[in-house]
Image (cartoon, rainbow, N blue to C red):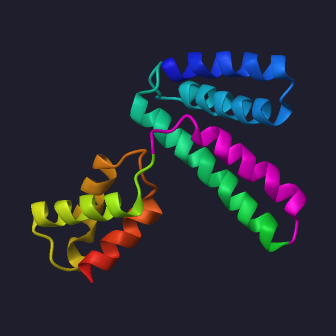
Amino acid sequence: MALEQQLTSEIKNAMRAKDSLRLEALRAVKSAILLAKTQSGAAEELSEAQEIQLLQKLVKQRKDSAAIFTEQNRADLAEPEKAQAAIISEFLPQQLTADEVEALVADIIAETGASSMKDMGRVMGLANQKMAGQADGKTISTVVKQKLS
């Protein structure tokens, strides 16, 4: 609930500042939260983990769109997407550096006794739990593959 209250106040601030780009990004987040809450079978309130997962999904969507627009030489469309991704990222926990991710993955591999790619599923499951919201799945996956191969 804290995220929703924070979004509401940020939306008001963006309206006062007439910052349309920030306002658009914040409204997209608020909309996604409301949709998640009203899905059938969903709990009345989202947990912090669900909120982080939702924010990560929105950031990834923006980054993917920006990459496609850049690939098509449409910088005019790519820039707002990148800016919105940055705005949404403000609500995510502090991201881990590549070295920190590698160290955590090495600890998990030692903890589980993983030795080959057969153990990747177990390692990824634990890594995603420990680093939820602090690193994206693609980065974690790359590091795990490097360590296990």
Residue for point 9% across, 68% down = 113
Residue for point 20% across, 71% down = 119
Rendered location of residue 32, percent (x, y) = 63, 34
Rendered location of residue 40, percent (x, y) = 53, 29
Does 108 sit above or below residue 59?
below
Horizontal relation, residue 1 to residue 129: left or right: right
Q: Is residue 53 magenta?
A: no
Rendered location of residue 93, percent (x, y) = 45, 39
Point out the stretch of residues depicted in magenta.
73-94
What is the magenta segment's predominant secondary structure?
Answer: helix
Horizontal relation, residue 76 to residue 93: left or right: right
Q: Specify the quadrant of the image occupied by residue 148.
A: bottom left
Rendered location of residue 121, percent (x, y) = 27, 66
Residue for point 43% across, 59% down = 137
Horizontal relation, residue 95 to residue 84: left or right: left
Does 20 sit above or below residue 128?
above
Residue for point 27% across, 76% down = 147
User: From this viewpoint, is residue 1 visible?
Assistant: no
Q: Nearer the viewer, residue 38 or 4?
A: 4
Q: Nearer the viewer, residue 143 or 55?
A: 143
Number of numbered discs on residues: 0
Quadrant placement of the C terminus: bottom left
Q: Nearer the viewer, residue 75 or 43?
A: 75
Q: Nearer the viewer, residue 117 or 75?
A: 75
Horizontal relation, residue 81 to residue 35: left or right: right
Does 24 sit above or below residue 72?
above
Q: Is residue 78 magenta?
A: yes
Q: Specify the quadrant of the image occupied by residue 63.
A: bottom right
User: From this viewpoint, is residue 95 visible?
Assistant: yes
